[in-house]
Image (spheres, grey):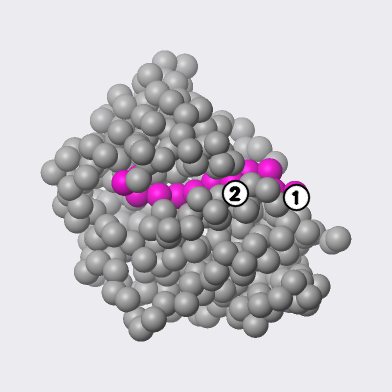
Amino acid sequence: MTELQDRYGREFHYLRLSITDACNFKCQYCLPDGYQRSGKSRFLSVDEIGRVIRAFATVGTRKIRITGGEPTLRKDFDQVIELAANTPGIDTVATTTNGYRLPENAHRWRQLGLSQINVSLDSLDEKLFRQITGDGRQQKVLDGIEAALDADYHKVKINVVLLNELNAHQLPNFLEYIRRRPVDIRFIELMETGLGQEYFQRHHVSGMVIKQQLLAQGWTEDPRGPVDGPAQNFSHPDYQGRIGLIMPYAKDFCATCNRLRVSAIGKLHLCLFTECGVELRDLLGHDDHQAALVARLHQQLKQKTETHQLHQGLTGVTQHLASIGG
């Protein structure tokens, strides 16, 4: 079957699939007031999730990232891992988590088929971690990262949202952390969302600041692979780990886009910053709808724009990244 491709020749082999928008942390840049439940949530069932994954697999998707919110809050998280891992055509099953359940579960999730794991860790300083995330379980997160390394995941990454006046000065701490750990640390530029301009303007700092520091210290940029995402990755012979920079405001950021998103309530998002999602749920109730679901995916790809409009201040209606899985 024809693989997913847009008008600009970009191919889409990577699906970020949210299974909940609930989260138990209160990160300043995402859910500063904590998760606010709006009515009775109707998140995708496991059967509906399975139909989404199978449809994407038939049109070339090879990697599934299970996201949230905090995806491990779902009681059937294990079942979702197994389902994705056992879907023909899916080569990689990943997740992004705040890490609070990792110490006890990292090995079991690896055995179920989870092969890559990203852990959000915005500071190695305990007090600053608590300030940014609204949660005091930093040590549990750190223990979870060690458990993931021990469980021999193909990749273990740490996500750090770069925040001026908070953690932007902590590059030396993170570099020391990966000196003897095979972990990728990815600094992600703060992106403006519906939380408003004030927080963004106060705390946004360009990833170019980190890039210049890395180059000055002897780090070199890695060649981009054919299926790599938007991160610019850097290596150094004295460090086991790598540094990645995700800079959505950089020139040509969208040229390498290779991912689509499905929200926890079954909407297709062609971009992280769009005005609305495309309804898929009406086609997720029965296996007989798979052909129509695939046809809708192909049709909607024709509407994908060449680039986001963040530079024009157009952030879409997304109030926080937890709502569609970041």
Who's the residue at 17% across and 40% down the image? 126
What residue type is disc 1 on? Pro
**Within the image, what quadrant is residue 200 found in?**
bottom left
Residue 196 at x, y = what percent? 29, 73
Query: Does 95 appear in magenta?
Result: yes
Label 1: element kind: loop
Which residue in the structure is indicated by mark 1?
A: 88
Secondary structure type for disc 2 = helix
Q: Is residue 215 above or below residue 12?
A: above
Instruction: State the residue at coordinates (40%, 23%).
Output: 181
Quarter assignment of residue 7:
bottom right
Amino acid of disc 2: Glu
Q: Nearer the viewer, residue 10 or 97?
A: 97
Displayed quadrant of residue 300: bottom right
Q: Which residues are magenta?
A: 88-100
Relative to 284, say whether 56 is above or below: above
Q: Residue at x 68, y 66 (%)?
A: 51
The residue that disc 2 covers is 82
The mark total stands at: 2
Q: Is 97 left or right of 297, judged from the image as shown?
A: left
At a point 31% along the width and 27% down the height, the residue shown is 177
Left or right of residue 169, residue 218 in this image: right
Find the residue positioned furthest to the right. Answer: 1
Query: Contact (CB < 8 A) between labels 1 and 2?
Result: no
The answer to whether 217 is drawn above or below residue 225 in the figure is above
Disc on the earlier residue, 1 or 2: 2
> Which residue reaches farthest left?
127
Quadrant assignment for the C terminus:
bottom left
State the image coordinates of residue 94 (x, y, percent, origin top left): 54, 46
**Mark closer to the observer (1, 2):** 2
Looking at the picture, how far across and down is residue 149, in whole percent? Answer: 43, 28
